[in-house]
Image: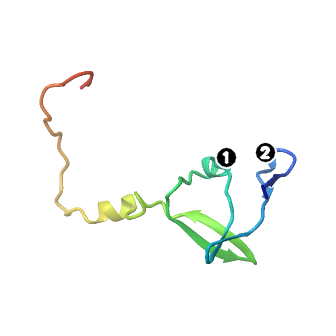
Amino acid sequence: MGIHYLQYWEKKTMITKVQKWGNSQGIRIPKKFLDNSHIRIGEEVELAIRDGKIIIESTNKIHGRYSISELVSNLPKDYNSEEENWGIPIGKEEW
């Protein structure tokens, strides 16, 4: 399979292979690594090289497009949030 965990998960390291996928190269990232790094499938990540190491970090974008701070910064300065009346509960909704 190409993925080999080092002795215990507590080490939070693994050895894997860079593999060719079509015209690109890639590595497989185990679910446990994604869960512990709070990165989700389909999320944009930033790749960087630091001290000769490849670093993968979340861009913290919502659905791959915007971060919360970007969205909030676009609100008008005089914006005041208020509660919206959506009507009476239907089905098993609780208000």
Residue found 40% across the figure and 58% down from its top = 63
Front residue of 94/41: it is 41
Marks 2 and 1, how far apart in space?
9 Å
Which residue is identified by label 2? Answer: 9
Question: Is 48 situated left or right of 67 in this image?
Answer: right
Q: Quadrant of the C terminus?
A: top left
Q: Is residue 32 above or below residue 75?
A: above
Residue found 12% across the figure and 30% down from its top = 87
Q: Amino acid at mark 2?
A: Trp
Circle 2 sits in a helix, a strand or a loop, which is it? helix
Q: Amino acid at mark 1?
A: Lys
Circle 1 sits in a helix, a strand or a loop, which is it? helix
Q: Quadrant of residue 62?
A: bottom left
Front residue of 87/20: it is 20
Q: Quadrant of the N terminus?
A: bottom right
Query: Which circle marks residue 23 in the picture?
Result: none
Q: Is residue 22 above or below residue 92?
A: below
Which residue is identified by label 1? Answer: 32
Q: Position of residue 55 (x, y in %)?
A: 66, 68
Residue found 76% across the figure and 51% down from its top = 12
Which is more N-terminal, label 1 or label 2? 2
Q: Is residue 33 above or below residue 84?
A: below
Residue found 35% across the figure and 65% down from its top = 70
Pointers 2 and 1 in contact (CB under 8 A)? yes
Q: Position of residue 49 (x, y in %)?
A: 67, 77
